[in-house]
Image: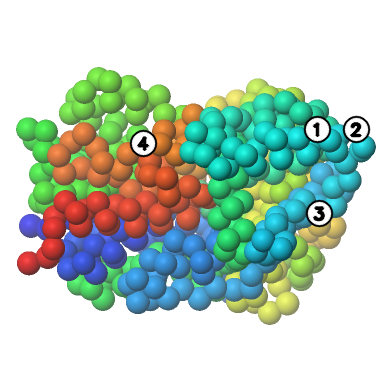
């Protein structure tokens, strides 16, 4: 009999397991694969530490993963800090700097607005936005406002729409007419405060690797096993059943398997009232993503990462992508982890991750998209293709096989109607069942980008459980 069983060893699951073990709880962590990490795992090949999916870490040693690792006494080593995110629109480079204190607020370097747009953009910032940051009502309004309508209220400047429409959805992987202004500002604020976009020296696996070390040090038990169902009887959690039929008992189960998967498949909708089951079924997930991990024989660029897009109306563009078309010029996001931490690649070589957000529908031709991504990558990084020693493509099917039946990046997208208080609670209506991960957590602090949010949910979930169970012994 355990105090708590944690289902799934992603950032949220491993993080909360480590924090609860440190509290002195008897915790079992179950992960279906032979390694932890989930969407933030990595593997090694020919001296490259390759993310299993794709990553950029918004707050480095000042973020929530670093905080958990320090709390469990297994500090994560971080690489070089970068001071901003390069942006590329149809051949022109820009940079969103994270600034430094009040003297240097975040700036969009390289953007020259025509005279006619200067006053409207100033009004957008100083009249429509900054005063709203002073009140909760104002923030709530910004949370509910989507990036496109916010911008369009004052300007239709094509370059500004392209920059916002291709770059900020990179935080959420939903189109910019569904991305929240309030959430975007909070992310920029968090990045500004931290001034530390960074990358773990051990690669993505270094994060959950540190949590797992802490977990086992404090007596936690880790077992590889796929949970078939979370056993509920009389409205109360009893434990879990593994695929091999083994039953494990615990009064509390924390699921990191995704809120929809947990409700629909692991518990079963029949255990919830109809209203709650409908609410969960209607949560909007993010899009999926096609990734190309490329091992380069030479270093071809110093750029740590870039959001890019064509000089096309982003609404037109994303609608075409939604319909299954492959535009001639595409929006590509690229991260080069070895430009943050050279340890990620053998000396003189470079690791590059190209990513294109794509809907999950069957009408998407993933192979043609891969060719187009390499073509687009070549335009931004000349010499890319001739330097590729080998590459791996990872897309919806890979995510479906390994993590999520829908193949999405996150089961609750940060749309303008699903952020802040409107995100699902970590406390389920079933006695003893909790969720953890980047798709849950409706506290004000559950803001940010994927990994940082999953770690925030682990911190909050550990507090919730501590309050529920009281002091150990
Ligand atoms: C392609 C891609 C690119 C991304 N890029 C970024 C980025 O640049 N920056 C960023 O911050 N975030 C990024 N994210 C998002 C980020 O990776 C996730 O939000 C975060 O890692 C999710 O953590 P989690 O705790 O929710 O758990 P998950 O990573 O979803 O892990 C859940 C774990 O539970 C396990 N599991 C599921 N079901 C069972 C079961 N029945 N039994 C046992 N185990 C089970 C899974 O195997 C998995 O290990 C990206 C995600 C993807 C997919």
Mark 1 Cα-neighbour bin, 10 Å: few <14, some 14–19, many ≥20: some
Task: Left or right? Give the position of 382 relative to 343.
Answer: right
> Does the closest atom of ligand 1 sit within 8 Å of the Cβ of label 1?
no
Quadrant (top left, top right, bottom left, bottom right) of the C terminus: bottom left
Q: Answer with the quarter of the image where residue 466 lies.
A: bottom left
For mark 1, what is the residue? 120
Label 1, label 2: how many angstroms apart (C-alpha)? 8 Å
Residue shown at the point (68%, 79%) measured from the top left: 347
Q: Nearer the viewer, residue 297 or 180?
A: 180
Mark 2 against mark 3, which lies toward the viewer? Answer: 2
State the residue lying farthest toward the bottom. Answer: 347
- Image coords of residue 166 (percent x, y): 71, 39
Residue to which mark 3 is pinned = 109
- Provide the secondary structure element on which disc 2 rests: helix
Contact between marks 1 and 2 (CB within 8 A): the answer is yes
In primary-sequence order, the first of circles 2 and 4 is 2
Q: CA distance from mark 4 to mark 3?
A: 37 Å
């Amino acid at each position: 009999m355990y105090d708590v069983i944690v289902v799934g060893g992603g950032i949220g699951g491993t993080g909360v397991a480590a924090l609860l073990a440190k509290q002195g709880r008897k915790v079992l962590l179950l992960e279906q694969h032979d390694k932890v990490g989930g969407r933030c795992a990595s593997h090694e090949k020919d001296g490259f530490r390759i993310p299993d999916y794709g990553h950029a870490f918004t707050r480095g040693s000042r973020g929530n993963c670093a905080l958990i690792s320090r709390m469990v006494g297994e500090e994560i080593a971080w690489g070089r800090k970068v001071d901003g995110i390069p942006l590329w629109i149809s051949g022109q480079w820009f940079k969103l700097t994270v600034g430094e204190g009040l003297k240097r607020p975040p700036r969009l370097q390289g953007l020259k607005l025509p005279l006619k747009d200067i006053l409207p953009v100033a009004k957008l910032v100083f009249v429509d936005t900054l005063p709203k940051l002073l009140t909760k009502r104002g923030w709530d309004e910004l949370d509910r406002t989507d990036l496109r309508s916010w911008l369009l209220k004052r300007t239709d400047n094509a370059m500004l729409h392209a920059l916002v429409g291709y770059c900020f959805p990179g935080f959420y992987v939903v189109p910019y007419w569904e991305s929240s202004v309030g959430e975007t500002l909070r992310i920029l604020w968090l990045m500004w405060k931290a001034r530390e976009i960074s990358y773990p020296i051990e690669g993505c696996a270094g994060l959950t690797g540190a949590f797992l070390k802490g977990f086992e040090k404090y007596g936690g038990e880790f077992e590889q096993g796929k949970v078939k169902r979370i056993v509920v009887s009389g409205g109360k959690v009893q434990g879990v059943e593994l695929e091999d039929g083994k039953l494990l008992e615990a009064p509390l189960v924390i699921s990191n398997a995704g809120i929809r998967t947990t409700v629909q498949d692991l518990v079963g909708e029949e255990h919830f009232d109809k209203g709650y089951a409908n609410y969960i079924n209607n949560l909007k997930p993010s899009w999926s993503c096609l990734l190309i991990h490329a091992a380069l024989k030479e270093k071809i660029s110093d750029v740590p990462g870039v959001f890019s897009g064509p000089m096309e109306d982003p609404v037109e563009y994303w609608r075409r992508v939604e319909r299954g078309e492959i535009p001639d010029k595409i929006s590509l996001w690229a991260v080069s982890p070895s430009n943050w931490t050279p340890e990620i690649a053998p000396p003189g070589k470079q690791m590059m991750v190209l990513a294109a957000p794509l809907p999950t529908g069957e009408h998407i031709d993933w192979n043609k998209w891969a060719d187009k991504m390499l073509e687009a990558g070549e335009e931004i990084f000349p010499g890319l293709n001739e330097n590729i020693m080998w590459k791996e493509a990872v897309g919806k099917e890979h995510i479906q096989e390994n993590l999520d039946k829908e193949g999405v990046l996150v089961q609750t997208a940060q749309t303008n109607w699903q952020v802040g208080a409107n995100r699902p609670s970590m406390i389920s209506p079933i006695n003893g069942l909790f969720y953890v991960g980047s798709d849950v957590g409706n506290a004000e602090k559950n803001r940010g980008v994927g990994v940082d949010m999953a770690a925030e949910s682990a911190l909050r979930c550990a507090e919730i459980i501590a309050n529920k169970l009281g002091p150990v012994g």
